[in-house]
Amino acid sequence: MTSQRHDRRCAPMFMRFFGRTRRPETLSRVDWDRFIRARRSGKVAPPGVKKARAVGERIIEQDLRYLLAVLNWAMIAGDGRSGVLLERNPLKGLQLPKNESPARPILISEMYASARRAARDMDPRVELFLVLANETGHRGASIRRLRWADIDLERAMIRWRGENDKVGMAHETPLSEEATVLLQRERVRQGAIGETWVFPSRRGDRTGPITVNAARHLWTRLAERAGLPLGQRYGWHSLRRKFANELKEVPLRDLAALGGWKNPNTLLMCYQVGDPETQRAALASRKKLSANGIS
């Protein structure tokens, strides 16, 4: 779900929960905690949700960040009488719920091999999307918005536009031989160049790239065909985690640039995981510290 869509759904949910006539300055820690409990249990949900269901900490955190942003905006918005709508944010400083152990599954090599075999029997664009996700380590959102003008097959380089990137980072990365071969094949198949989408929508107008839902559906079809786990937060992003861990020995700065991570620390905090083989190798190569230095 996009942030704009989330925000549009949040406003009526909060008004229904707190009451349309509730004055924002009267909100308190009690209301904060009450909302968290209700959201966790599924007793409160955005409009349009027909079946109540419990949600995780991440969604609740997004909801409350929206509420805090609205209250902060009210502190600088004029009330038409030389004042502001809200003197202070009554919820400022309250702790947001956090999932200390979020599920971040990684697609391992054997699973990727199964997916690759399944993709070959499906649609050429499914195979291309899969290979680009594996070979570039980039987000699915950036991949689905690629244009042929972003692909330089002669130099084997790919341009990632800032407007298509989650963190707004414009950058270029090299293409692997495997990705280059598939891109050449797809360009011939499409007969397209310039600003044409690499993954055009299959709707009647074909004026845009495939949608978020279409890309998600491609993954679901692929996972079913390949026998991959469903409903366990794998998706295209599991290939980004695969990329981060398979290239763990690459200098952190270079790996961040290669996969489009603006902050290298994100790799350490959210993507890379420790493994026994690397740890054993580190112990085997351990040196001794003495008065004369390390030897």
Image (spheres, rainbow, N blue to C red):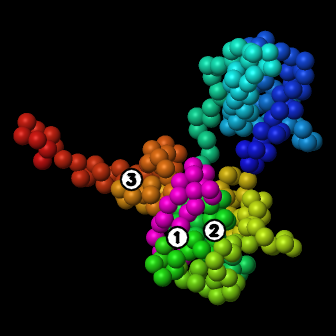
The residue type indicated by label 2 comes to Leu
Q: Is residue 160 above or below residue 15?
A: below
Q: CA distance from mark 2 to mark 1?
A: 9 Å
The residue type indicated by label 1 comes to Ile
Q: Which mark, residue 252?
A: 3
Tag 3 secondary structure: helix
Provide the residue designation for mark 1: 158
Provide the residue designation for mark 2: 146
Q: CA distance from mark 1 to mark 3?
A: 20 Å
Going by the image, does 215 lie left or right of 153?
right
Q: Is residue 162 above or below residue 206?
A: above
Going by the image, does 10 lie left or right of 166?
right
Q: Residue at x 64, y 71 (%)?
A: 147
Residue 113 in view: no
Instruction: Tell me which label, 2 or 3, sits earlier in the chain.
Output: 2
* Quadrant of the image occupied by residue 249: bottom left
Instruction: Tell me which label, 1 or 3, sits earlier in the chain.
Output: 1
Q: Which mark, residue 115?
A: none
* Nearest-to-viewer mark from 2 and 3: 2
Q: Residues within 10 Å of mark 3 (few under 14, many from 20)?
A: some
Residue situated furthest left in the rendering: 292
Q: Read off the magenta span.
A: 158-179
